[in-house]
Amino acid sequence: MKKHLLFFFLCFPYYFFSQQYSNYLGAGHSNGITVTSSSEQSRTNWRETANGVNTVNGHGLDARLLETSRFLAQATFGTNLDYIKSVAKNPFEDWIDSQFDINSPSMGQMTTDIYNQALVIFIANGGNHKDYNGPDDHHFNYAWWQSNIGNNDLLRQRIALALSEILVISWDSNLNDYGVGLGDYYDVLKDNAFGNFRDLLLEVTLHPMMGGYLSHYNNPKSDVDRNIHPDENFAREIMQLFTIGLYELNPDGSYELDGNGDRIPTYDNDNIKEFAKIFTGLGTAEVEQNEYDVVADFGAGFQYARKNIPMVMYDEWHEPGEKKLLNGQIVPSGQSGMKDIEDAVDNLFNHKNTGPFIALRLIQQLVKSNPSSAYISRISSVFNNYNGVRGDMKAVIKAILLDEEARSCSWVDDPSNGKLIAPMIRYFNVIRQIDLDNKNGLNWNLGRSFFRSTGQLPLGSPSVFNFYLPEYVPNSEFTNANLKGPEFEIHTSASSLAYLNEVNSWTNTNRSILQTRNLGLKDTPLDFEKLKYYAQDGEVLVNMLDKLFTRGQLSDETKRIIVDAIEPIKGQNENTDYMHNRVRMGLFLILTSPDYVILK
């Protein structure tokens, strides 16, 4: 019975905000009502009092709060309880609209500034400036964390990370030395997160970091005598991974089938070769200052290229002649190389697959691994045409987060619902939702221990195929249920145990959760002072952690296990800070529970 009562209260907000009632008890409608109770409890060392009027005024009913916690778990990297309460006061659409109006500082510029600041610190601690390299991936990581702790642009940053796992480059590659370029590429994702997908796709295509990663930087035209042919790498991936996928799709994301019941490929090797011709002739617009007199020209080494300025076209190196695109479109001979590229981007942007392809991947990133065909179809329709505009990212994001399949409690117990929260998202949640004992005043973090443990950090994918495949099926049970579990591809016996060790380290006394390297700065551990107040009672502490991390969905079984582990922790003498140890235990157990790591 208790489970059913909990389910009722969790679902209450959805029906409350979809219908208007004029006369009912609860949720604040208690004007003119006097409540008399047999006792009103107050307890020593507690700020709260149990008042009889709370039985009708809605105080203590956390349904709206928990629904808001769940919404923000989809739309952000985590928030504290005060923020959850503030968002809960208004419709979620209002919060989304307000987030659309918040701009972000440049991460490319911040990477440069942090490198300069770090160099000063390094020298002040006795280092030689010649021994300090950068700006590189370390400084990009410092900038990413500095940008994502204490910031207000929560939705923009969340969408940027989601896009970074679709339009992939990685510092875990030959790009690791180019921190400013990494930051600038992230700016392209972040600054276009609320723009138009067509503009995003074109900027990604022209970004030198993508050119260096997928080898269309200095990609020359054909020279048959020298057996030189256009590189096909980017041409393949912009189709397979960035826009249309391998097979023709219906608007609901299902595969189109031919007369034999087989999937229909979207492109073949000839199409790859034709698109490869398009992406020739791009080179650096400017070069870094250098002692070798290298100037901006086609063929200038990638190490000299300015990584925060779009590539430019050198038409003499661009493949001449007409090119055949998809759906019978022909790029005519004689036009400029940049016009060829714009035509190719438009060809893919307008392909019927792009709507459902991008819809599915964004839903999987934000909400659930196995959206229904109807959910995909609704988002695909918004992508295809929202007030006469195709590719409007604001409309797509709002539609994903406000769709009934994302918001309605009726989906909570559906076996197809939910997703495994990726390890790095869990990491971000802890840092954003628990106070930090920050002595150095900087939110820089290298995160290398976590990366070694889980293989994840922003822009740290092992390949262009991201950390995991969106089509990944973990085992036969998923196969039989026709379900996918993308994040389970990196949930191995090794990584899952390593995550437990990471959580143990974060919750251990004086262990750091933010770390720098070679700078002599004090690392930053978590600060449990505020949570120690709730630790006076194990159940009160767990209820608080439930609001923050498990979105009100902590099962009775898990809750009892955690409370039973907390309650025996007592002080051995007056000098023992046993409340600290209670918080440590509660936090460790909730962060390693299935109730937390599965987002429903």
Image (cartoon, helix red, strand yellow):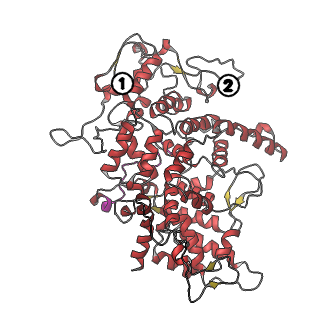
Looking at the figure, which quarter contains the N terminus?
A: bottom left
Three-letter code, disc 1: Lys
Decide if residue 445 is in sight here.
yes
Which of the 4 image quadrants contains residue 111? top right
Q: Which residues are magenta?
A: 460-478
For the point 40% across and 38% down, which residue is it?
Answer: 241
Tag 1 secondary structure = helix
Q: Is residue 537 magenta?
A: no
The spot of residue 442 in percent (x, y) is 73, 51
Principal SS element in the magenta part?
loop
Direction left: furthest residue: 259
Decide if residue 459 is in sight here.
no
Direction top: furthest residue: 334
**Mark 2 or mark 1: which comes first in sequence?**
1
Q: List the residue tagged with mark 2.
A: 288
Three-letter code, disc 2: Glu
Direction bottom: furthest residue: 38
The number of callouts visible is 2
For the point 42% across and 64% down, which residue is it?
Answer: 21
Using the image as rendered, state which of residue 523 and residue 433 is in the foreground. 433
Disc 2: CA contacts within 10 A as few (<14), some (14-19) or many (>=20): few
On the rendered structure, is 82 left or right of 339?
right
Disc 1: CA contacts within 10 A as few (<14), some (14-19) or many (>=20): some
Q: Answer above or below: position of 356 versus 515.
A: above
The spot of residue 571 in percent (x, y) is 70, 84
Q: Is residue 464 magenta?
A: yes
Q: List the residue tagged with mark 1.
A: 273
Looking at the figure, which quarter contains the C terminus?
A: bottom left
Tag 2 secondary structure = loop
For the point 40% across and 22% down, which residue is it?
Answer: 343
